[in-house]
Image (cartoon, rainbow, N blue to C red):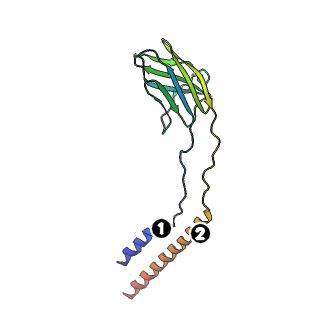
Amino acid sequence: MTKYRILLLLSILIPLSLPTYVVFADIGPKPSMEFEFELLDGITITSGILYECDQSDCSDAAPMEELGPQRLACDSISCSAVAYGFAPYHRLEIQFSDGKTRSSNIFETIDFDSVYLVTINADDLSVEEVSGSPAPPYEDFPAEPNSTIYVVVGCVCILLLIGLITSAIIFFVRRSRKK
């Protein structure tokens, strides 16, 4: 029965000896684009694709990847995009309820948060810059607790664990010699 107690004690002490750290992942504001449409009577948006380009002529256009919160989302009257970071140039391709898919002119990223007005023409879209706002000021992460405490507690736990293992080995060696 003592073997089980030792294993239980070890299974409790080992996790407690590991230091804990606060981890921050995927936090903070992300750049966004809002597309406001001047819709024709009876026409609604059914889907959309935002192409990103590094070249000003969009010869290297590629659809924006959907990764976590990064995506283009459209409802029946507008679209919005959130990304970890946008390419400098874009082209919008929207499918409408009239069955037509229209592509926009090439437009640039205005700012961190950008608003665009999209005019629907017979065969294409015209995207105009409306406004943009810069990235919010950098915010520091909350102060981390003093790591010295974690180091000291971790060292004490490791020393206790080494002492416990050494005691267990000595105990079992002496016990086996008595038999």
**For numbered disc 2, what is the local secondary structure?**
helix
Look at mark 1 in the image and give the residue it sits on. 14
Could you tell me residue 106's position as x and y percent? 57, 20
Q: Secondary structure at mark 1?
A: helix
Q: State the residue lying farthest toward the top.
A: 122
Measuring from the top left, give residue 68's x and y in whole percent: 48, 39
The earlier-in-sequence mark between 1 and 2 is 1
- Counting from the top left corner in percent of width and height, residue 80 is at 50, 29
In the image, 97 versus 123, the foreground residue is 97
47 or 118: nearer the viewer: 118
Task: Name the side, left or right, on which 144 lies relative to 75.
Answer: right
State whether residue 114 is above or below residue 143: above
What amino acid does circle 2 point to? Answer: Val
Give the residue at the far left of this rendering: 1
Q: Alpha-carbon neighbours of circle 1 within 10 Å: few (<14), some, or many (≥20)? A: few
Residue 153: horizontal and vertical position, in percent? 56, 69
Q: Residue at x 42, y 81 (%)?
A: 172
Q: Nearer the viewer, residue 154 or 80?
A: 80
Local packing at callout 2 (Cα closer than 10 Å; few below 14, some 14-19, many 20+) is few
Which corner quadrant holds the N terminus? bottom left
Residue located beneath label 2 in the image: 152
